[in-house]
């Protein structure tokens, strides 16, 4: 029952998100007072304005609307010249908006201001024209910016054609009317409405480009039009991305729903490692402290890449269709100036991707910085197997048991060629080189078995050099370790043996290290003290210093002359070839365990 | 009419030719042969990967197959593909010269290439090499028991062919341009070949040194890379990628050049932002030398070095992005026709974009840790090398086929093959991105069963892809005898190579041309490319 409920809610959510809330366009900016109910806008997008409406121009000549439209788009403003407030603001808004555009009135488009007061004369219109053209301050606008008047019947026809509802208020001798302007195509169809008294330059610009059927404008405008679409309910251009994100949101919910569904369904064992859809595995489920963040970086970068790709593919497709040779379309001004565009499409993606660089680098640092007090595991890779050793000395082959919720630091080396330690579920990978120690770390977050791969090609059986990481509850791990160490093998590959330091002490005696470094590594005149050495800073005979880490200890055993401690002569023989990687691990564990003042 | 093909039919006239056009064709034949060998190896690899178990070939054979695939495809197909075939054929004609600066050196370059190719391929086929094309040490020096020495010797020899060709191009482009042909009037194909030649000349010697050091250690046990001998295995990776990363640009820059030629021709427009595109080739050549460390993010190099290399890798994407955006903008207000070469060019832009963007994911440090050495990397570079370079190569071959052969190929077949290749390619390599993020390692002969579905998809795609490659062999071959005779300039293209007859005479031009305008002087009055009358698709668009 609960399941059905969830699905029902989910469907409701989908429907409400996907449905466009502005399905029916409300007429915005209606006069709010009840007295003027009939004042406002009725949007009539795409409707043809009668081309035979006759108006009077500034010289008093009668002109039909058709002759005013010529072949350019037009900005149509209904106002009256004696208007004490709103009309002045509307006209100022038009002038200020148009001043910011690259195209000029009279050249690329026409402006038609028509008085709704039939009592006003062409003389008054001519005066107003002077005032506003001075404010617009661009030469050559005169013939393309008309201030018109007309008879009551003709202006009323025009007003009703564009859905402009106004009333005469005899008390104040004023016209009550809404604010806003209309864009007409060159044929006289209504293309756009912009409401209010201020018009954003971007809205005007894109509106004019579209009203001109793309005959004016640059590549930049075309690019902007891909991102911004006219929103009739708002009377402005809004980012088209809103509708994209809305549907992306729906898609995400749908995906989450399917994920939820697939998690509930009974499934084969593989599925706690991979998320599949219709039998196609699509995403690996993470199981370490870094996996979630790494996945997040990956998915966000992927979205960035998809958006970039979408932009390129959309443009390729659009241009290919629109500018195919057989399509008759406007091709004037086909080589616009490129510099600005080149800078924009270089700098914008680069700065976005730099954030990705920064974030991924930060996580990389975390992934390469083992936290203190991590559980220390030694890893030896060889053709074609993995050997692991726990701090207590328990050894395993091709299987590593670790506790969940505790960082595990791996100190790794190879006996032969380069291998790579990779656990996809933990999102970690690190090459293992012969002749030196590499470290990496992880912290498992979920109990389970995870695949281990060698990802650096290492010879014939490379593909078979795999294994399992078994992440256990800490208590179970402690119990397992106990059992593996003392009570015989828990798994077939586990070798119950003496602990690392014990074996190391044995080697220390057998190889004769005691002779120079003293019992218990307390130090003698011939060899430096080893107690408390690990992690300390050592001064060398050449005056430099070095921190005594695993690689330093390893090198000092194999190539003792490489770094000689200050005050000592290089007497020590090389143990290269006399100790195995396993012996080295044991010796180093022993040296690490030596504390100051400890007895042999 | 006399032309470079019918002037002399004797075999010796081909084997001793100094004509850059004939040498270009010699290269075309030879690399087609190497492509077939590399392709056969890939076929068996894809067949093996149909099932999780290793049931078609043994692990050893599998390792030898992917080595054969990589070595032949990289050194004996991709690197010489566009530079040595189209570059040789076109550079002198595009700049209005009679031949390259050193015609004999050019022929020597082909002989060196063939010698190297035979030595390597003989080693790969007779005994096999199991190191992968990257020859990582100490595996290749001290552990592999296969024929590493002859295989590398062949690569070493072929490297000299690269260096000689690069030198020849650089000198030719500098010294032999026609009167009036300034740098800023050069076709972009010439610019990219110039940038490629710089890489060839500067990077290939590093490969020669690296191979030399590797052979020293392998043969004489001089300790250079193996720590047991006192060497450093990471040193090899640094040296190898110092060559091989720039080599990646050798394998893509010429493809970008071809694409610039095709897109301008079939949209009847000058290239948008010519200058930016020209300089971006040089930028790629230069920055490309500074990013080799991004192959080593999990190798144990310092995290700070990793950060620098990651940053530079993000930077090197800028010039490539500029090119993609400029090609797209070139279509704006053009008069576009969709002839076969244009389909390849559009395919190039799309596939190269995918390859490039996934390159950014790989350049991001933390993401690389997870996907390094997985199929994600395989998918990424095949999108660049195959989706990009091979598309451009085929696009170029179709575009200049009338010039090379004097015949027109059947347009409908050409379009069909181009579309088939595009879909086959995506079906083959897109699933590999997913496989990579799931964690499937590369170079695995067997794999866990949960990866099977995607591998089967990939193998199916490879069959389609193979069909897409075989088709042109047939219809291009057919056109040599039965194709319609080509006019001098079937595409109504600008460019000096179209001002001479198809096929051209041995010395290219009857009268030495003089250049008065920049490349791609297409206007609204330029007639459209030749329409092939019997082509239903041509009428549809």
Image (cartoon, rainbow, N blue to C red):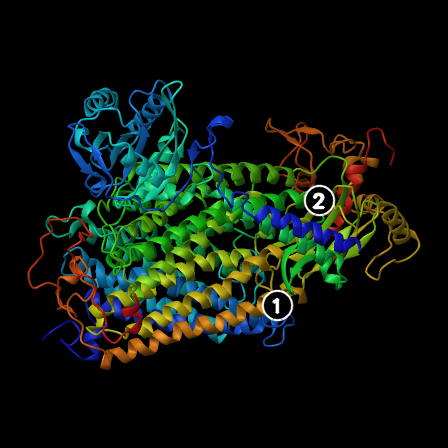
Image depth: mark 1 or mark 2 in front: 1
- Whether residue A342 is visible, yes or no, is no
Asked if labels 2 and 1 touch by Cβ distance under 8 angstroms, the answer is no
Q: Quadrant of residue A367?
A: top right
- Would you name the residue on which mark 2 appears? A442
Q: Name, please, the residue furthest toward the front.
A: A170
Mark 1, other Cα within 10 Å: few <14 / some 14–19 / many ≥20: some
Residue in the foreground of this view, choosing between A350 and B514: A350
Relative image position of residue B57 (x, y in whole percent): 58, 75
Tag count in the figure? 2
Relative image position of residue B158 (x, y in whole percent): 36, 62
- Would you name the residue on which mark 1 appears? B453
**Which chain is disc 2 placed on?**
A
Mark 2, other Cα within 10 Å: few <14 / some 14–19 / many ≥20: many
Relative image position of residue B287 (x, y in whole percent): 39, 43
Residue in the foreground of this view, choosing between B196 and B482: B482
């Amino acid at each position: 029952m609960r399941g059905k409920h969830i699905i029902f809610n989910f469907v409701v959510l989908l429907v409400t998100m996907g449905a466009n809330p502005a399905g029916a366009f409300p007429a915005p900016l209606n006069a709010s007072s009840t007295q003027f109910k009939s004042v406002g806008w009725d949007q009539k997008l795409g409707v043809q304005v009668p081309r035979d409406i006759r108006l009077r121009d500034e010289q008093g000549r009668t002109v039909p609307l058709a002759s005013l439209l010529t072949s350019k788009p037009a900005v149509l403003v209904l106002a009256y010249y004696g208007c004490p407030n709103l009309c002045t603001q509307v006209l100022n808004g038009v002038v200020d908006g148009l001043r910011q555009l690259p195209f000029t009135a009279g050249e690329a488009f026409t402006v038609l201001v028509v008085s709704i007061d039939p009592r006003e004369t062409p003389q008054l219109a001519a005066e107003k024209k002077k005032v506003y053209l001075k404010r617009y301050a661009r030469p050559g606008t005169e013939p393309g910016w008309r201030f018109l008047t007309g008879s009551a019947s003709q202006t009323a026809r025009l007003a009703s054609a564009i859905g402009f509802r106004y009333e005469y208020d005899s008390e104040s001798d004023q016209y009550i009317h809404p604010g806003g302007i209309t864009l007409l195509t060159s044929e006289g169809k209504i293309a756009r409405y912009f409401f209010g008294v201020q018009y954003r330059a971007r809205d005007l610009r894109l509106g004019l480009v579209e009203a001109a059927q793309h005959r004016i404008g640059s590549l930049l405008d075309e690019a902007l039009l891909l991102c911004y679409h006219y929103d009739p309910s708002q009377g402005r251009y809004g980012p088209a991305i809103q509708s994209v994100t809305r549907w992306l949101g729906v898609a995400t919910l749908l995906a989450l729903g399917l994920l939820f569904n697939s998690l509930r369904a009974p499934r084969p064992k593989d599925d706690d490692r991979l998320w599949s859809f219709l039998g196609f595995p699509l995403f690996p489920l993470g199981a370490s402290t870094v996996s979630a963040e790494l996945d997040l970086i990956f998915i966000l970068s992927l979205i960035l890449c998809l958006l970039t790709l979408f932009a390129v593919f959309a443009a390729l497709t659009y241009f290919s269709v629109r500018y195919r040779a057989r399509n008759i379309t406007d091709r004037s001004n086909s080589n616009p100036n490129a510099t600005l565009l080149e800078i924009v499409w270089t700098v914008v993606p680069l700065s976005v991707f730099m954030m990705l660089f920064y974030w991924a680098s930060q996580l990389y640092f975390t992934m390469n910085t083992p936290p203190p007090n991590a559980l220390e595991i030694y890893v030896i890779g060889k053709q074609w197997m993995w050997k692991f050793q726990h701090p207590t000395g328990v050894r395993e082959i091709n299987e590593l048991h670790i506790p969940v919720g505790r960082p595990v630091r791996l100190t790794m080396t190879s006996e032969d060629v380069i291998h790579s330690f990779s656990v996809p579920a933990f999102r970690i990978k690190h090459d293992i080189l012969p002749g030196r120690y590499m470290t990496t770390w992880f912290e498992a977050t979920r109990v389970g078995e995870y695949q281990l791969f060698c990802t650096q090609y290492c010879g014939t059986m490379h593909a078979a050099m795999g294994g399992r990481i078994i992440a256990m509850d800490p208590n179970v791990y402690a119990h397992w370790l106990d059992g593996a160490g003392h009570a015989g093998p828990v798994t077939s590959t586990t070798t119950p043996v003496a602990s690392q330091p014990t074996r190391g002490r044995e080697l220390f005696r057998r190889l004769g290290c005691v002779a120079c470094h003293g019992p218990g590594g307390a130090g003698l005149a011939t060899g430096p003290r080893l107690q408390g050495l690990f992690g300390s800073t050592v001064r060398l005979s050449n005056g430099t210093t070095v921190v005594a880490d695993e690689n330093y200890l390893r090198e000092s055993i194999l190539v003792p002359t490489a770094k000689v401690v200050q005050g000592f002569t290089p007497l020590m023989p090389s143990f290269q070839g006399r100790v195995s990687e396993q012996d080295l691990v044991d010796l180093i564990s022993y040296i690490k365990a030596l504390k100051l003042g400890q007895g042999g | 009419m006399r032309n470079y093909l019918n002037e002399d039919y004797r075999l010796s006239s081909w084997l001793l030719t100094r004509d850059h056009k004939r040498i270009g064709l010699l290269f075309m034949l030879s690399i087609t042969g190497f492509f077939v060998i590399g392709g056969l190896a890939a076929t068996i690899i894809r067949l093996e990967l149909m099932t999780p178990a290793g049931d078609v070939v043994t692990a050893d054979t599998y390792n030898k197959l992917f080595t054969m695939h990589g070595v032949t495809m990289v050194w004996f197909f991709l690197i010489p593909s566009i530079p040595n075939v189209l570059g040789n054929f076109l550079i002198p004609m595009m700049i209005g010269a009679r031949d390259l600066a050193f015609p004999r050196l050019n022929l020597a370059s082909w002989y060196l290439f063939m010698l190297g190719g035979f030595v390597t391929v003989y080693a790969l086929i007779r005994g096999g090499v199991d190191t992968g094309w990257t020859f990582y040490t100490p595996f290749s020096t001290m552990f592999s028991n296969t024929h590493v020495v002859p295989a590398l010797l062949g690569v070493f020899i072929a490297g000299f062919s690269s260096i000689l060709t690069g030198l020849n191009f650089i000198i030719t482009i500098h010294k032999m341009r026609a009167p009036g042909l300034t740098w800023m009037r050069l076709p972009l194909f010439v610019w990219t070949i110039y940038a490629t030649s710089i890489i060839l000349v500067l990077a290939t010697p590093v490969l020669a040194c690296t191979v030399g050091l590797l052979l020293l250690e392998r043969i004489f046990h001089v300790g250079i890379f193996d720590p047991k001998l006192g060497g450093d295995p990471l040193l090899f990776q640094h040296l190898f990628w110092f060559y091989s990363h720039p080599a990646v640009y050798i394998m893509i820059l010429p493809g970008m050049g071809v694409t610039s030629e095709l897109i301008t021709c079939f949209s009847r427009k000058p290239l948008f932002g010519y200058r930016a595109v020209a300089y971006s080739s040089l930028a790629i050549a230069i920055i490309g030398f500074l990013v080799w460390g991004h192959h080593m993010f999990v190798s144990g190099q310092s995290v700070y070095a990793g950060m620098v290399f990651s940053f530079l890798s993000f930077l090197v994407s800028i010039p490539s992005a500029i090119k993609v955006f400029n090609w797209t903008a070139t279509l704006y207000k053009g008069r576009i026709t969709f002839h076969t070469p244009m389909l390849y060019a559009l395919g190039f832009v799309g596939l190269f974009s995918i390859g490039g963007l996934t390159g950014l994911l790989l350049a991001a440090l933390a993401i690389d840790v997870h996907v390094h050495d997985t199929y994600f990397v395989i998918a990424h570079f095949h999108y660049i090398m195959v989706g990009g370079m091979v598309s451009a190569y085929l696009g170029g071959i179709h575009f200049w086929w009338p010039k090379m052969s004097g015949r027109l190929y059947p347009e409908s077949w050409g379009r069909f093959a181009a579309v088939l290749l595009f879909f086959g390619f995506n079906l083959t390599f897109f699933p590999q991105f997913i496989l990579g993020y799931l964690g499937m390692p590369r170079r695995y002969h067997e794999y866990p069963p949960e990866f099977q579905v995607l591998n089967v998809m990939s193998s199916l795609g490879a069959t389609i892809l193979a069909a897409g490659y075989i088709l042109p062999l047939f219809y291009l071959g057919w056109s040599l005898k039965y194709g319609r005779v080509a006019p001098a300039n079937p595409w109504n293209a600008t460019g000096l190579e179209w001002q001479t007859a198809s096929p051209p005479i041995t010395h290219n031009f009857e009268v030495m041309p003089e250049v008065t305008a920049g490349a791609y002087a297409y206007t609204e009055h330029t007639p459209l490319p030749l329409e092939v009358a019997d082509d239903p698709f041509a009428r549809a668009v």
